[in-house]
Image: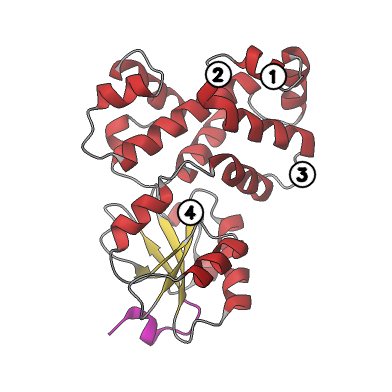
Amino acid sequence: MSVFAVLAPPAVLQLAPPYERFEPVPDLAALTPDDLPNAAVLAVGLPPPHDAWRETAALVHELRARFPASPVVVRVEGRNEADDDIRRMAAEAGARGAIGEGDMVPALRRMLTDASALPEQVLAWLSLRIPSLRTDVREMVGVIVERSPRFGEVGPLLGSMGRAERTARTWFRRAGLPGPGKWLAVAHAVRAALRLQAEEKAPLLTLAVECGYSDHSSLSRQSLRLFGARPGVIRRTLGWEWLMHRWLTRAAV
């Protein structure tokens, strides 16, 4: 019997490394971010007839706002895969995606390690995490993340936006954020982390060099400095949210 059969819809579930199975969250009101391990995934369960979208969207928004270190997905009972309509509605609700009951971990891995929409995802995440953040600063963060694969230094990147580095640093400092150069560094590190998660068997040295690091030791030092976690630990997790949240939290200490 599916877990959704004994829970009032829409149910909230959690999935923690090593991502073997979803567990129901019995008391969402009592759940705190400290109750969740690093890289836990939260899911809003959608049992048949798969039409509770108002409640689902409200829960997705609540989970994203309350638990910024956890990606949120929609899990559909009774189907091996989510169809296009459910995927569209999940995206409109703000979820990272929708999965069915079959092929769960591979589907999650593909979904949560896909960097193609990373700039938009980071902007949406930042809007919920820091609602008062100035729009121009938030948009600069998005451009830095978007253009990070093409730039190794922040000065030329900001120049491509028509922004002076000194002015940008002032704006970020006034917003209480790490400077733009640090955002570029963490964007590189997050993209490398997603490659590590997606390509489980690829040699660390190969991925490090392809991601712009001189060698695997350089990537390891950067990951430890920014996230407090080495590549081997990151590789056993899914998603970028816990890394970005961990970095911002450590930067604010």
Q: CA distance from mark 1 to mark 2?
A: 10 Å
- On residue 160, the disc is 1
Q: CA distance from mark 1 to mark 4?
A: 31 Å
Q: Verify CB contact (< 8 Å) between mark 1 and mark 4.
A: no
Which image quarter is the C terminus in?
top right
Which image quarter is the N terminus in?
bottom left
Report which residue position mark 2 lands on: 151
Q: Is residue 81 left or right of residue 172?
A: left
Pair 2/4: label in front = 2
Q: Residues within 10 Å of mark 1 (few under 14, many from 20)?
A: few
Q: Amino acid at mark 2?
A: Phe
Mark sitting earlier along the chain (1/4) = 4
Residue shown at the point (33%, 19%) measured from the top left: 209
Q: CA distance from mark 2 to mark 4?
A: 27 Å
Q: Amino acid at mark 3?
A: Ser
Regarding mark 1 in the picture, which secondary structure is present there?
helix
Residue 134 appears in view = no
Q: Which residues are magenta?
A: 1-11
Pair 3/4: label in front = 4
Report which residue position mark 3 lands on: 132
